[in-house]
Amino acid sequence: VWIDDSVVSGNIASHPDYSGSGAGLYLIDTGAGISNSQFTANNASGFGGAIYLIGYSPDSVAQEFINCLINENTASFWGAGLFANLNAAPHLENCTIVDNIISNLSFGAGGGVSCYNAFVEIENSILWGNDAVYGSQIAVGDPSEYDNPMATVLASYSDIMGGEDEIFVGDAL
C-alpha cells in the first residue's frame, strides 16, 4: 500500500461487540509506505481510531509513516491514533500525533500510540495532548494482563508530552 499527500478523515469503524477497528486505515500482514498524509477525526468502536496494524510480512515493504499528522481520532479501547498488534512493525518518522482520545474512561490505553505484541519505532516525532486512562501518549501492553507478550516502543529524538508519566508499560512474561 502506497499513500502520499492524502487526507483520511471522518470515517467510522463500528460493530456492536466493539470490534470495529482502524477507521482510517486497517492493514493485516501488509507493508505500507505512507507519507505527507493526514488522518483526522476517525472513530473506531474498538481499537485504532485512525490506524490499526496487525502482523507484518517480511516479504513486503516496511510499515512506514513519514511526515504524517494523526490528530483528533477516537477509539474505545486502545490506540486512538495508532494501534500496532501481533507482530506489526511500524516506523513513524517526522509524525505529529496529537489530540487523540480513548473514550473508555475505565480501561482505555494509548491515546496516541498503543503497542501489543508488536514493535513500534518513533523517530523525530511529536506526541502531545492525547488522552487515555493508561498511557495518554503511549501504551505498551495491556493494562488488564499480568503477563503481557513482548512489545516494544522505541522513541528517539521525539517530544512526548509528560515524558515517562504519560507512558504505560505493562508487565511482561
Image: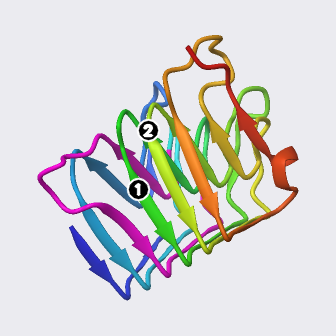
The residue shown at (66%, 16%) is 144
The residue shown at (76%, 35%) is 134
In the displayed structure, does residue 142 sit left or right of residue 104? left
Residue 90 is marked as: 1
Q: How many marks?
A: 2
Q: CA distance from mark 2 to mark 1?
A: 9 Å
Could you tell me residue 13's position as x and y percent?
A: 42, 48
Let me know if residue 58 is in the magenta part. yes
Could you tell me residue 58's position as x and y percent?
A: 18, 48
The residue shown at (37%, 33%) is 86
User: For residue 140, what is the image quadrant?
Assistant: top right
Residue 70 in view here? yes
The residue shown at (69%, 34%) is 108
Could you tell me residue 95's position as x and y percent?
A: 56, 74
* Mark before the other along the chain sequence, 2 or 1: 1
**Up-down: is 100 above or below 168?**
below
* Quadrant of the frame with the C terminus: top right
Disc 2, disc 1: CB below 8 Å?
yes
Kindly identify which residue carries mark 2.
Answer: 118
Q: In terms of secondary structure, where does tag 1 sit? A: strand
Residue 62 is marked as: none
User: For residue 69, what is the image quadrant?
Assistant: bottom right
Let me know if residue 81 is in the magenta part. no
Could you tell me residue 159's position as x and y percent?
A: 75, 69
**Amino acid of disc 1:** Pro
**Up-down: is 147 above or below 21?**
above
Q: Which residues are magenta?
A: 48-73
**Amino acid of disc 2:** Ala
**Up-down: is 135 above or below 12?**
above
